[in-house]
Amino acid sequence: MILKKLVKVAALGTVLLSGSFFANAAEAATKIGYVNMAQIVQQMPQREAISEKLRAEFKDRIDELRGLESKIKDKVETIKRDGELLGTSGKTKLEREIASLQSDYKLKAQALDEDNRRRQGEERQKLIMQVQQTVEKVANKEGYDMVVDAQTLLWAKPEDNLSEKVIKEIK
């Protein structure tokens, strides 16, 4: 009987001790902030400069595609307008030219799309790296131990949102 009471007291002491351990751990909890990465990237002034840079980089290829579109459209209109005057051989020749131009257009458009997507990814990665560096700088200045993306949160205090501070620091 005394042994049972002694075991219960020891168990209760262990529970209380472990409870106080966890309470002390909770007091020393890390300070966690959050940012809305999408909002930050959207509001970065560098984003527009990158868009202009990419437009300039691909301008010649886009103009070439527009030229091919124009040629295809002109040849289709010629067939519609002068199809009977051209005769079967003339019409067949134009149809083959249209098919060749369309094939060329499709290949060049696909290559342009792939290259443009790749370059956008590269430039977006540079922006994200810049945001991450700025987040780290702001978090250190504000005394945060950890910063997470707002999309991963279910709820957080608005005062722990560092997004505006990061945007101001980037600008």
Image (cartoon, helix red, strand yellow):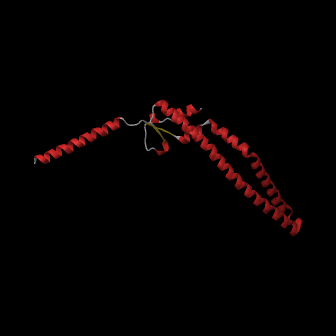
Q: Nearer the viewer, residue 54 or 159?
A: 54
Q: Specify the quadrant of the image occupied by residue 21.
A: top left
Q: Residue at x 71, y 44 (%)?
A: 55
Q: Residue at x 78, y 51 (%)?
A: 64
User: Residue 135: x, y in percent?
Assistant: 52, 36
Q: Specify the quadrant of the image occupied by residue 50.
A: top right
Residue 131 vertical placement versus 71 (above, below): above
Q: Is residue 157 left or right of residue 15?
A: right
Q: Is residue 132 left or right of residue 70?
A: left
Q: Is residue 116 left or right of residue 158?
A: right
Q: Residue furthest left?
A: 1
Residue 113 vertical placement versus 48 (above, below): below
User: Residue 51: x, y in percent?
Assistant: 67, 42
Q: Nearer the viewer, residue 145 or 107?
A: 145
User: Residue 42: x, y in percent?
Assistant: 59, 40
Q: Residue at x 61, y 43 (%)?
A: 124
Q: Residue furthest front?
A: 3
